[in-house]
Amino acid sequence: QLVMTKLNQTEVTQLIALLGRPAQFDLLYSTKDHEASNATFHRLCDNHPKTLTVVRLQGRPLFGGYTPLTWNHTGNHQRDPSGESFLFVLSPNNDPKKYPVDPNSPEAIYSHNTSGPAFGGGSCLYVELSNFSVSYSNPHPSYPTLPANTTLAGSYNKWPNIEEVLVFDVSKNQETRQVPSLDQPCEMNARVYEELQTRLRNWQSRFVEEVNLLVVGGMGSGKSSLINGAARVLHGRQLNLVDARPSSQAVTCKLMIQSFSEVIDQGHFKLWDVWAWTGTNYGPDTLVKLLNGELESGFVFGDNPLTSRYVRRGPLPRTEHVHAVIFVVPVDQATFDEYYAPMQPWLQACRDRKLDIMVVLTKVDNLDTELRQNPEKLWNSVQVNDLRMKVATKVGIDPKEVLPLRNYFSETSNSLPIDINLASIMLRALDTSETSFMRWFSEFVLLRETNESVRRLQEMGHRKKTVAELKRALFKAFGDLSVADELLR
């Protein structure tokens, strides 16, 4: 919780990806919480291995450096034979840049009791904590890939408006059991499955009769198989509601809305199966109308949404909209930027509508072949959890919202762990939709109530009081001052 007051989730996700492991962030030093001085930095940070220095400038992405070496008072440069030290700059597009040290350089870091954190012989990054204005960055062979003195902070020195400098101890890893986003069942047995199955069948939204979950992904990603798997869990046996084949060709080219309460008289939700994206097959009109619930089951993607008979005239009430989006990413495409390029318009459209999203990482047994015979070991797979971190960085979401799934296409002798896995994923998706709806509902009610307060205060001519009252109301409703400021603007 302390870390999340200093770093947002996107920043944490990118830093974890740069470190290459699920690190635990223990705050050692902050220029806001402690005295902004080199002496205080050394008093709190010396002799701690594996520290991450983070600099926050107003209007710039975070930047800084990591080293496994310890800071001290010696006044000497230190070599990092491991080659693990690096400089970095984060990205608003979830594309952080990493500039590793030359392991043969004798100047990975420099420590002196009168200086702040210093990386490289140049220094490639020097943070003067007692006087921010003399901090600077300069390329040097010790960090050979750092391209320019403007790469990190935007200028060589005299950096404007340093908001905070942070130093974290990242020597510890989060325990593996903390990484999965679902509560891993303590036992993979029939009793656990029956409990999950009952919860899924009886799940009911507090806001709508049926929740609309949109499932989207690239060709052959496994989205149709995900829908058939959900039907299997609800019904108790394999049901092929939609055509699903492992193929490089898009199977679904029409909008198929599966209402489980109608098909198998169980489940208060609908799964929307759509055309696989290829980068050009979704125009902005089609995407907007789809998320706004204006396209009906049977709409042929590629048709003009303005002339198709499967389009309803909007605007429609929020109960008819898509309530959450499940992005399906197969492991064999998960590390390729080309797969994520067509996803960007979808992500932006979801952000615009404040829709919560999640990612289902499919075909994980292609990554870890042991899962083919032992699917119950899914949550303990190092390869799978490492990939979840990378996918979360690319999409810009919390790693807890990237859920692994081992697909099945027929009855298998060891399907119980897969059934438990899929039932848990569907419950998480439904809870995600409820979060989106709660956010929208809260904002709607809040704005309706505060509008009346604003009107009364404005009539009395109290503009300053109006702003203060509104800000307090927003903060009380959302518990986050930054959210209050954003909504106030």
Image (cartoon, helix red, strand yellow):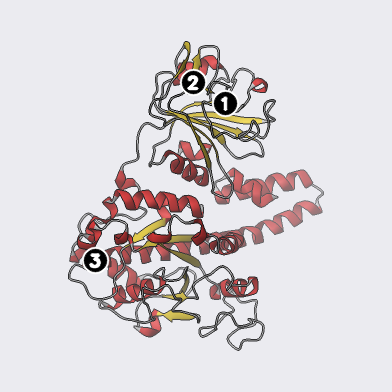
C-beta proximity under 8 Å, tags 1 and 2 = yes
Q: Name the mark nearer the viewer: 3 or 1.
A: 1
**Rendered residue at 41%/24% (across/down):** 80
Q: Tag 2 or tag 3, which sits nearer the N-term? A: 2
Q: Which mark is residue 222?
A: none
Q: Tag 1 or tag 3, which sits nearer the N-term? A: 1
C-beta proximity under 8 Å, tags 3 and 2 = no
C-beta proximity under 8 Å, tags 3 and 1 = no
Q: Amino acid at mark 2?
A: Glu
Number of dots carrying numbers:
3
- Residues 109 and 448: in front is 109
Q: Secondary structure at mark 3?
A: helix
Q: Amino acid at mark 1?
A: His
- Residues 482 and 59: in front is 59
Using the numbered discs, state the Cα–Cα distance from disc 3 to disc 2 in whole angstroms: 56 Å
Q: Quadrant for residue 242, please give it.
A: bottom left
Residue 320 rendering spot, x and y as whole percentages:
55, 76
Relative to 124, is 331 above or below?
A: below
- Residue on which the image places disc 3: 193
Residue 308 rendering spot, x and y as whole percentages:
62, 86
Residue 179 rendering spot, x and y as whole percentages:
35, 48
- Residue on which the image places disc 1: 140
Q: Can residue 210 be seen by looking at this rendering?
A: no
Q: Can residue 55 be seen by looking at this rendering?
A: yes
Left or right of 33: which side holds 237?
Answer: left
Q: Secondary structure at mark 1?
A: loop
Using the numbered discs, state the Cα–Cα distance from disc 1 to disc 2 in whole angstroms: 10 Å
- Residues 68 and 414: in front is 68
Tag 3: Cα neighbours inside 10 Å, few (<14), some, or many (≥20)? many
Left or right of 71: which side holds 464?
Answer: right
- Residue on which the image places disc 2: 107
Q: Amino acid at mark 3?
A: Tyr
